[in-house]
Image (tube, rainbow, N blue to C red):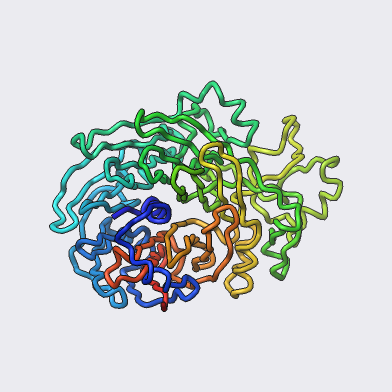
Amino acid sequence: MLPLAAMTAFAACSKDDTKNPETETKEDASTFEAIGTIDIGDKGAAEISAYDPASKRLFVVKNDGTNMIKILNLADPAHPVDLNLDILTNSGAVNSLAVHSGKLAAAIEATDKTQPGRVVVYNTENLSVIKTIATGALPDMVTFSPDGKFILTANEGEPATDYSVDPVGSVSIISVDNNYSVTNIDFSSFESQKDALRQKGFRIFGPNASFAQDIEPEYITVSPDSKTAWVTLQENNAIAKIDLATKTATDIFPLGFKDYNTDANAVDLSDKDGAITFSKSPVKGMYQPDAIAVLQNGGGIPHLFTVNEGDVREWDAYKENVRIKDLQLDPTAFPNAAALKAEAALGRLNVTKTLGDLNGDGLYESLYSFGARSFSVWNGNTGALLFDSKNELDVKAKEAGKYDDARSDDKSIEPEGITLGVVGDKTIAFVGLERVDAVALYDVTNPAAPVFIKILECGDAPEGVLFVDAKNSPNKKSLLIVSSEDDGVVKIYAPKN
């Protein structure tokens, strides 16, 4: 089975003669509904899930006191059962899981997160350890390539809170067939391109950090042919492209900025305006994507789907965020500065101090907030933006009565997870909305023109969004499995028909 986003992207674009067209076309994504639920703990108890079709087991990250992997029997998806066969991982939190061909890969950070982490590979049947492999610092996400030959981790390399240590951000490429040998690649080779990348919206700004130290890989997806990987560089506002044959990073695509001063991008940027009101504002958003998935039909353009959550560097020794009311605005750029800085206007909005003061005089000519409150589709060959959901996720959350106005001054709905899957004869994107406690469904059969379908309620702060196709599902129906980190709830959904 293919894990997480890579799994579903592969399913979405590969022909499989074993599929039953009659069964597939009967499924309708608009009829997805919750069929099963299980509560496995408290805050931190259900972050990421991975499913093994052979054993019909669901493996779930559980970090609510003791670091472990919870194992559920999913033979009947409507009634998941705790098998009480927890895998204790001892030192270090488990950050991510992936499954392929009877192997479970777990990304585990070191007790001191600035030190090298590890991937532990387990047998999904007897839970024995197959191999332990050292990675870079803070492996935050793990995935298999669709062919199962590689395990990849995004090693975020976050600094110590006092910035006494700032590890290099990296990607570990583990060759399964070569006794799990590992190659750790970083992005130091792009140092000479730093200024050109910055001009396009790339961010390098950590105190005293080198180019390689400042990059923080977040999430990985792999092409259906297992030849190319793409990794989000969230804090840096970019996507990197990796050649898996040569094990080298070949491109960095800066993502630029989103203009909230248009009707289509109108959002609510205040939590003190007494209402949920979407209006144009002289602010730009940094995309800063978290999860990423790829959809590629045949040898065509790889379409990269990102959820643009946003993230802030906020450590004891360094904080980039500031509210607009506490900034000095350039009077020429903002002649109405006093009105904008009112709390009911833009005063409460969190923006970065690292952008907007072009001439260094302490007066800000532009304002840049965190995240883009959307999901986007990018050309995986060039980095060009092909689609953005603009303000639709905010609008749909409000219509559903799920919008939390208290988050308007921060990152709003916070799209965080995404997975793709074929349901019936359509390709569907499932977008996890952390601050809405919901998942939005879109028809992305035409990846350049996604169409909203519906919103599904889930647990508190959905982190893991996993699709299991009907062929691999225990009940032979497509399944959506959502794990929520703030309440430990795992919910399973399936279409009615």
Answer with the quarter of the image where residue 138 lies.
Answer: top left
* Residue 242 locus on image (x, y percent): 42, 34
Left or right: 431 as drawn, with respect to 225: right
Residue lying at 50% horizontally and 31% vertically, measured from the top left: 251
* Residue 343 locus on image (x, y percent): 73, 59
Residue lying at 74% horizontally and 30% vertically, measured from the top left: 359
- Asked whether residue 491 appears in the rendered view, the answer is no
Left or right: 457 as drawn, with respect to 74: right
453 is higher (above) or lower (below) than 170: below
Q: Quadrant of the N terminus?
A: bottom left
Residue lying at 55% horizontally and 51% vertically, measured from the top left: 308
* Residue 382 locus on image (x, y percent): 56, 36
459 is higher (above) or lower (below) than 356: below
Q: How many labels were placed on the picture?
A: 0
* Residue 469 locus on image (x, y percent): 35, 63
Q: Return the residue found at the far top.
A: 192
Front residue of this view, candidates 267 and 13: 13
Front residue of this view, candidates 27 and 126: 27
Answer with the quarter of the image where residue 155 lies.
Answer: top left
Front residue of this view, candidates 308 and 86: 308
Left or right: 342 as drawn, with respect to 485: right
- Asked whether residue 2 appears in the rendered view, the answer is yes
